[in-house]
Amino acid sequence: MNGRQAHRMGTLVLSLLMVGVGTALIVQVVDGRGSVISPRLLLAVLFVAAGAGRVYAEIRRGRGA
């Protein structure tokens, strides 16, 4: 595994962790009967969006597109 592959793998792992953290926060808000406009819910949605966007970008870049 060269440096570029290690960087790509690390990016994918951290991005998937961001999606996981965001999902866990959403579950906490829903389970705790949190408000729809809760700052925690906004943070969770942003975590999921950022992680998913980064995974999408890495996959697209890997295909050569």
Image (cartoon, rainbow, N blue to C red):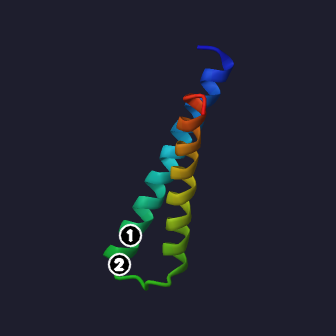
Horizontally, is 26 left or right of 14 in the view?
left
Name the residue located 50 percent from the left edge and 82 percent from the top edge: 38
Of the 4 image quadrants, the one containing the N terminus is: top right
Residue type, label 1: Gln
Of all residues, the one furthest to the right in this rendering is 3
Q: For the point 44% across and 65% down, which residue is it?
A: 25
Instruction: Please tell me the numbered disc located at residue 28.
Output: 1
Q: CA distance from mark 1 to mark 2?
A: 6 Å
Please state which amino acid type lies under the numbered disc 2. Gly
Which residue shows up at 50% across the image and 66% down it? 45
For label 2, the residue is 32
Q: Are marks 1 and 2 in contact (CB under 8 Å)?
A: yes
Taking depth in this image into account, of 11 and 52 the one nearest to the observer is 52
Q: Residue 7: x percent and y percent? A: 64, 28
With 29 as the anchor, is 57 left or right in this view? right
Bin the neighbour count of mark 1 within 10 Å (Cα to Cα): few under 14, some 14-19, many 20 and up: some
**Residue 12 locus on image (x, y percent):** 54, 37
Please, what secondary structure does the residue beneath circle 2 have? loop
